[in-house]
Image (spheres, rainbow, N blue to C red):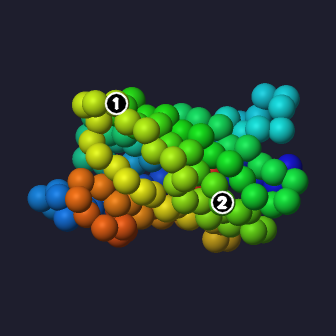
Amino acid sequence: MTLDFLLGTWRGEGVGGYPTLEQDFAYGQEISFTTYGKPVVQYASRTWRVDDPDVPMGREVGFWRPQDDGSVEVLLAQPTGLVEIFYGRVDGTKVEIATDLLARTRTAKEVTAEHRLYGLVGDELMYAMDMAAVGQEMQPHLSARLRRVA
């Protein structure tokens, strides 16, 4: 499977910021990519405050569906009321995806677009996310450096 390089559990730290936030922030993150007998990768991510690991921040779960032509379809859901469908490409040990469809509940924050890049650099998984939300244009929001722990 073209996503084999992602399989496992990854943990590390990242930084985030956005014009609508008073200050930038640091966070811890754990991402797991697992298989369950189908040509699909199950995905789960959780983040927490670096200065207090007992305080959760964000979560998302979903499925990554690699295609024979090197493309990938990604479906993600967040407990904040956001559901996203991404399309993108796998290129060696790099995956670049962008939203095609975003749906949100009435109480969810307005997010209009996302772009994500995941890639192996040595033995680390690097991650960057750009976002357009709450009236802001697409711009950097999150980035993290993770190491495989399982």
Q: Quadrant of residue 97?
A: bottom right
Q: Name the residue type under label 2.
A: Gly
Give the number of callouts. 2
**Vertical comparison of 97 with 102: above or below:** below
Q: Which amino acid type corresponds to the residue marked 1 in the rendered image? A: Thr
Q: Quadrant of the C terminus?
A: top right
For the point 77% across and 49% down, the residue is 66
Say whether residue 143 is visible.
no
Secondary structure state at the residue bearing disc 1: loop
- What residue sits right under mark 1 in the picture? 105
Mark 2 packing: few (<14 Cα in 10 Å), some, or many (20+)?
A: many
- Residue under the image location 62 percent in, 64 percent down: 96
Q: Residue furthest left?
A: 22
Q: Residue at x 37, y 53 (%)?
A: 112
Return the x and y of residue 40 as percentages of the image width and height.
77, 38
105 or 70, nearer to the observer: 105
Q: Nearer the viewer, residue 102 or 115?
A: 102
- Are discs 2 and 1 less than 8 Å apart at CB? no
Q: Earlier in the sequence, mark 2 or mark 1?
A: 2
Q: Residue 64: image x %, image y %?
A: 68, 43
Could you say where residue 2 lies in the image, as x and y percent from the top left? Answer: 82, 55
Residue 81 visible somewhere in the drawing: yes
Residue 141 image position (x, y, % from top left) = 35, 62
Task: Select label 2 or label 1 by which is in front.
Answer: 1
> Marks 2 and 1, Cα distance to the nearest angstrom?
25 Å
95 or 7, nearer to the observer: 95
- Determine which of the numbered discs, if any, sits on residue 88 in the image: 2
Secondary structure of residue under mark 2: strand
